[in-house]
Amino acid sequence: MSASRTERLLNLLIALLNTRYGLRRSELRDKVYHDTSGNDVAFGRMFERDKNDLRQFGFEVETLTELGWSEDDPATTRYRIGKESNRLPDVQLDPEEWTVLLLASQLWERAALGSAAQSALRKLQATGRTSEVQLPAGLQPRIKPAGQAFDDLVNAMHAGRPVTFRYLAGSTGKEEQRTVEPWGLGSRFGQWYLVGFDRARQAARHFRLSRLTSAVSIMERERYSPPADFDVRQELDRLPELPLRSAVVNVREGRLLALRRRALESVPAAPAPALPGFDRLAIQYRDPEVLAEELASYGPDAVAAAPEELVAAVRRRLRAAADFSASQVPRYSFPSARPRTARPRTSEDQLKRMLQLVPFLVHNQGLHIQEVASRFGITRKELEDDLRILICSGLPEGYPDDLLDIQWENDHVFITQDLDLTRPVRFTVDEACALLTGLETLNGLPGIAEGGALESVTLKLLAAAGQEGLRAASLSGPRIGPADASTHSVVRQAIEGREQLHLRYLSPQRDKVTERDVDPLRLYSLDNTWYFEAYCHLVEGLRNFRLDRIQDVRPNGRPAAADITPGTGVPAKLFTPNDDDTTIILQLTRQGRGLADDYYAERTAELPDGGLVAEVRFGNTAWLPMFVAQHGGAARILAPAEVADAAQDWLDASLASYGG
């Protein structure tokens, strides 16, 4: 969509909104399109495309005909857009409800629905300010990004398109091609599941996203309709958890303290004797693929001995990682350096944003232009480009007073003519799902679920979302309650009271336990894995600590320093960049391209096969061979050469432990 087309669609929308009796196609052609070509067929196609675009933005174009005449006669057919049918109802929220809603909107972060959640929030903010709302001190729960497959499945599900992918069946251990009509996505037992209709088996089936062995392909030319009463939450609640089983693992002497903490006292028999220089441990697990991912990352320091299903899963991951690392390096080039966004911005994004911008400015007069840009997540230049298009838009052949009137003199933005764009468009399916699923996810968060604000804001949003809100039943988020509520409570109280903490902490990368005094700054999560950011006096810098790796934590009686602030950015980052970081060039497959967001890539280059080359900064490169092995063929290191060679040596040694 070019800039001129963006402006044309905006003018068409304003014209159809501001007519009581409707406008004939000839009037629109003359006054909005300024088309004098005389080609009725070409104009008709353009008009139908534009009507479809407006429908995608939430505006339904009504067709009115003269009594006794057919819609096929353009001379007697008129078009308009109802002022109420496409608008978001007013939603009045008190400060407690705004607090809950802001937490819910931040949950998705870089996940597929992150931009949809922010878009929905801006629509709600258009009718009132939220500056007085204070989020709970240092609390930032988030949903862990589920990778490119999740993004593709959400897009296919909301568009009603079937998908195909290769899948490793847990019951047979065989990899098969599947064609599925996706009905819903949900998280249970720490894993994301797709529920859908398997066309080959002619029945509903569950698919664990971690078992997809290929990218998801969307069948763009086909459509399907899910069951009208489908609710993925109810469906996954009936899903039995996998039984606990025991694996036998040979662990190098004196290594892998984190794995040893989980070992059982008795070790079942294994088909092969213990390896020299290794201890034989018994580790409980439910899903062999999850444990295989962990064991693959340990490389030659941990060798699975039983059961054979687990051994094969580790070997398959290591082989895939080794094959990918040894493959030919693709040709690529980075664009000029710039902060990376979740996806490239499009003209469709611009028009959608402008339709939110007008009502936002109407109800938030006089904001500084940089604050407006920050609210919409764009640069000042992008905002000024939007405003320049808006001030040239208005009623067809209207007077100056019939144009949108927006001024930003002295860097403060005012709007005095809005042309009936004062209320936001109703929620899209993505927006409704993002907020309502986020609210449902907050149910397990201490201090939030107990109040009545969560329930009341959910009911208000359900009423405002209408039909789109009902489709939120196709998504169900993970449980985000912390596994260790007592540790979570101690850290949160220390943040609120500005107290210093003393902790004993197990660092898997260094494979040792250290004692530290820290000034806690903020708590955040990825699903139910919780972290806290703190100033660590041992290393004299900001660090992130996983709560489940804390062996002991208590206030040490000293106050936290008042001049230490959290790292920049909301939400908190798992990795804090430093000047002495090493720049690593990674190649990621289409399945693994989400890792570029997870590790805050500074530059990326697209590859023809849907993958990426990403430039990422790491403070410690010693663990990168573990990273490559863990992701089993989804990531490789291209540069520096010594780091790539270290990863290849790690994979070779790991495969040698399994017979080469």
Image (spheres, rainbow, N blue to C red):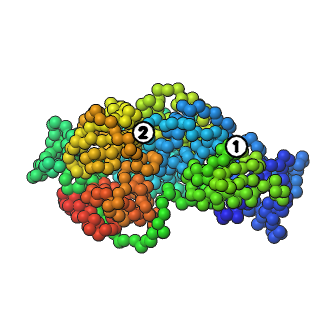
Front position in the image: 96 or 316: 96
Instruction: Give the SS element for disc 2.
Output: loop
Picture coordinates of residue 8, whole percent (x, y): 73, 60
Report the side of 181 relative to 24 (left or right): left
Outermost residue, left side: 276
Q: Is residue 516 visible?
A: yes
Q: Is residue 73 visible?
A: no
Picture coordinates of residue 241, whole percent (x, y): 36, 36
Three-letter amino acid code at disc 1? Arg
Instruction: Give the SS element for disc 1.
Output: loop
Task: Please name the residue shown 74% across and 62% down the image.
Answer: 45
Q: Which residue is mark 2?
A: 138
Rendered image: mark on residue 621: none
User: Which quadrant of the rendered structure holds the C terminus?
Assistant: bottom left
Q: Which residue is mark 1?
A: 423
Picture coordinates of residue 432, whole percent (x, y): 58, 41
